[in-house]
Image: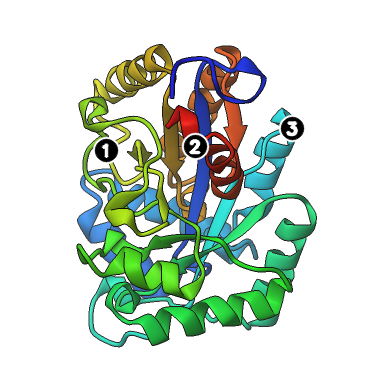
Amino acid sequence: MTKGRWPGGAPFALCLTHDVDRIHKYAYHYLYYGVTGGLRGPAKQWRTLRVRMSGAEPYWNFQRIMEIEGRLGVRSTFLFLNESAHGFGPIYWGRYRIRQPEVKRVICELDAGGWEIGLHGSLNSYGDADMLSREKRELEDITGKRVRSIRQHCLNFLAGKTFEIQQKAGFEVDSTIGYSNRLWNPDDGVFPYFPDRSGILELPISVMDTVSLEKANIRKEIRALLDAICSSGGLMVLDWHQCKFNPEENPHHINVYQSLLLEALSRGAWTATMGEVADHWKRIPAER
């Protein structure tokens, strides 16, 4: 694809995504992040705990995201996790079930508002076709619609198999390829692509909120990545967990997200969900 061939002649595209790993913050989360969060860790956890004691849930930030994006006239993809793996450690803590009434309600609210609902494939589903298909069906039972988009939890991926089982389960677009600890290298490509002749469209993650957003030069590095994607007419994919939209604990995460979104819009980006990117890309096979 050449520059300027996104809808409306937009110079590049921006895809907004949110992994929904946890929806409630429990006592062990405060203790764990207080100990592992560096010098500011205890103070952040104390501020967040005070909010929790007031009756607000620090991880339940769906409305805040809807307000940010709704005010700017954009929509994103929310990827819900239906975890079944068992074990010890933070990765297993605080799981939820998508059939919980509060979760079903917010899924339906997001769907009705124009946000896309996708699946955040569970820890072991990247290599288990039956598990992945079951998780997809359970989410579809809530939305009443076909779930088309997926990202594997913890970016778990098995070359030669994950895309194949995703395709067999009926997914169309994935955004698992990328990094949790560094930015995407634009030299590795900034366009969607169809890997392994699988029929699955891959949207590589440009920036995940797990990089150190408080690092001195991070904004400069992200801007350089944005410049590279814009100049080549590519696609930027943001992955911001909904639990990070907590101003008491993660002000940098909210600020960077909003700043990036505003900057992209000011440059004329076409902003879309994963499903919308897939629909557009498939309409222009001769341009890929």
Q: Residue at x 33, y 63 (%)?
A: 163
The mark closer to the camera, 1 or 3, is: 3
Find disc 2 in the rendering and name its residue: 285
Badge 1 vs badge 3, beta-carbon distance below 8 Å: no
Badge 2 vs badge 1, beta-carbon distance below 8 Å: no
Find disc 1 in the rendering and name its residue: 212
Question: 76 left or right of 220?
Answer: right
Report the Cα–Cα distance between label 2 and label 1: 37 Å
Q: Is residue 16 above or below residue 171?
A: above
Q: Amino acid at mark 1?
A: Ser
Q: Residue at x 46, y 52 (%)?
A: 241
The mark closer to the camera, 2 or 1, is: 2
Picture coordinates of residue 63, whole percent (x, y): 69, 51
What quarter of the picture does the N terminus occupy? top left
Kindly indicate the quadrant of the structure image that contains residue 191: top left
Q: Is residue 65 above or below residue 36?
A: above
Question: 287 left or right of 191?
Answer: right
Report the Cα–Cα distance between label 3 and label 2: 34 Å
Label 2: state its secondary structure: helix
Picture coordinates of residue 265, whole percent (x, y): 59, 20
- Residue 98 or 32: which is nearer the viewer? 98
The mark closer to the camera, 3 or 2, is: 2
Q: Residue at x 30, y 51 (%)?
A: 195
- Residue 111 or 191: which is nearer the viewer? 191
Label 3: state its secondary structure: helix
